[in-house]
Image (spheres, rainbow, N blue to C red):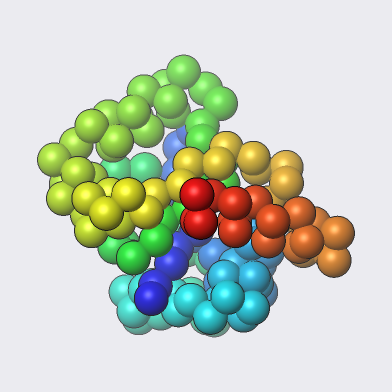
């Protein structure tokens, strides 16, 4: 299936290709997930990442949605909370099928080195199989 990883800051959300860490090297490589076609069409393979508004996350549907970090500011958290309560969010297949994983472990998912990748793999397997 497809998977997308989001790192949500106070002002924007970022999704990544397999060459920018955040667990994508594991999802798209080792675990065999594919990125959603919409991010490929938007050129993620060339740039390595895409930036979107928090509200536009719903425009990038995937079978699995992984959120590695959420905003730290109160304004950003309010925007993120509004997203989670929006009709468009609730209509996403990943949401309806319980395949959204809000990890909020930005430090763990930042690295691309072998130890970080091992910890990321363990955490992804834990949340996706429980």
Q: Nearer the viewer, residue 130 or 85?
A: 130
Asked if one can make out residue 6 in the rendered structure from this viewpoint, the answer is no
Residue 121, above or below 98 = below
Q: Quadrant of residue 92?
A: bottom left
Q: Nearer the viewer, residue 121 or 80?
A: 121
Q: Nearer the viewer, residue 51 or 121?
A: 121
- Looking at the picture, how far across and down is residue 52, in whole percent? 39, 53
- Looking at the picture, how far across and down is residue 98, in whole percent? 32, 49
Residue at the top extreme, as displayed = 74
- The quadrant of the picture occupied by the N terminus is bottom left
Asked if one can make out residue 40 in the rendered structure from this viewpoint, the answer is yes
Q: Is residue 62 left or right of residue 21?
A: left
- Which residue occupies 53% across, 80% down? 32
Q: Nearer the viewer, residue 98 or 78?
A: 98
Residue 76, above or below 38 = above
- Looking at the picture, how far across and down is residue 107, in whole percent? 73, 42
Q: Is residue 123 left or right of residue 92?
A: right
């Amino acid at each position: 299936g497809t998977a997308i990883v989001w790192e949500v800051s106070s002002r924007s959300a970022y999704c990544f290709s397999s060459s920018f860490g955040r667990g994508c090297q594991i999802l798209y490589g080792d675990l065999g997930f594919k990125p959603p076609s919409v991010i490929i069409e938007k050129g993620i393979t060339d740039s390595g990442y895409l930036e979107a508004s928090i509200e536009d996350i719903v425009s990038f549907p995937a079978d699995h949605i992984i959120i590695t970090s959420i905003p730290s500011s109160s304004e950003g958290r309010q925007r993120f909370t509004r997203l989670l309560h929006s009709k468009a969010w609730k209509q996403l297949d990943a949401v309806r099928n319980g395949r959204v994983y809000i990890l909020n472990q930005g430090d763990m998912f930042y690295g691309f080195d072998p130890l970080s990748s091992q910890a990321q793999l363990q955490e992804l397997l834990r949340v996706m199989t429980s």
